[in-house]
Image: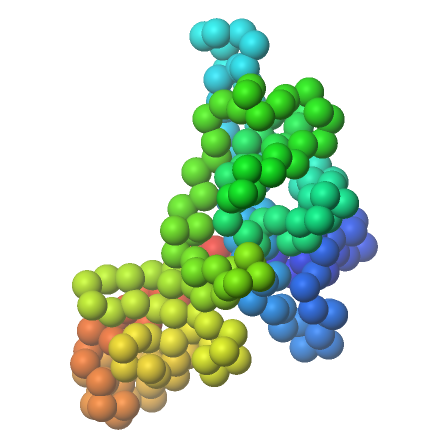
Amino acid sequence: MFTRWVNGNAQGAAAVKRYMPESPSGVVSFVDYVQARAIRTIRRERFVDHPDKPGEQIRVAPSLQQIRQAVEEAEKMGFPYPFARQHTTFVFNDDIVVKLEDGAVVTLTGKYKAQHLIEPIVEPYLFELEFGENGLASRDTPLSHGDRSIVIDPKVKYGTPIVMPCGVSVSALVHAIDEEGGIQGAADAYGVDPKDVKIALKYEDILSGIAS
């Protein structure tokens, strides 16, 4: 699904502009990964209060075309990759509004102005991100538990998810569970605490749920 949104396929064009050229291996850049996370959140069906009719709700489930138009409009305004920036998204039945951190408002139809914005979409992944000087996402911490966390940083091991503070990749620890016969065996093999292996396994389970 993420690949479809970033690369496009026979069913339609990509929803966002790629940050880096498409790779034959299917690997996407960190910025494109963040853009895909935004699309996944935005496209979840929800009901919101109607901005003009008190007490009435409307169903919103924006199309990929609407998202693509929002991205193109933001670029025209000088804000490429808007969903990889610090932002707030508002979705209506016929419009997507993206309010960027500096107050700039990107709207497709112009029907809803800044003063009419209602309850925004909750995009919890934004709280997990750090942003660079260029305004784009630069580091992600998609899972934390106690003093352990999963970190995705394109400057560290090419963006491979790693367990901090031990610094071992999620894939290595999960693979070691099978190779070493369990969580304790995997921990012993890498000289880490079993807690490191457990959070790696939990993150792997989350990814499996997203892919299914």
Depicted 204 relative to depicted 196: above or below:
above
Image quadrant assignment for residue 21? bottom right
* Residue 76 spot, x, y in % from top left: 76, 45
* Residue 10 spot, x, y in % from top left: 80, 55
129 relative position to 19: left or right: left
Q: Nearer the viewer, residue 139 or 178?
A: 139
Q: Nearer the viewer, residue 4 or 116?
A: 116
Q: Nearer the viewer, residue 16 or 131?
A: 131
Seen at 61% across and 61% down, the residue is: 32
Depicted 167 relative to depicted 90: above or below:
below
Quadrant of the image containing the N terminus: bottom right
* Residue 36 spot, x, y in % from top left: 58, 54
Image quadrant assignment for residue 163? bottom left
136 relative position to 65: left or right: left
State how many labels appear. Answer: 0
Asked whether the viewer can see residue 152, the reply is: yes
* Residue 118 spot, x, y in % from top left: 49, 23
* Residue, far top: 54
Asked whether the viewer can see residue 68, the reply is: no
Seen at 72% across and 56% down, the residue is: 17
Seen at 22% across and 85% down, the residue is: 192
Q: Nearer the viewer, residue 24 or 71?
A: 71
Depicted 165 relative to depicted 145: above or below:
below
Depicted 58 relative to depicted 97: above or below:
above
Color style of the picture? rainbow
Seen at 54% across and 15% down, the residue is: 51
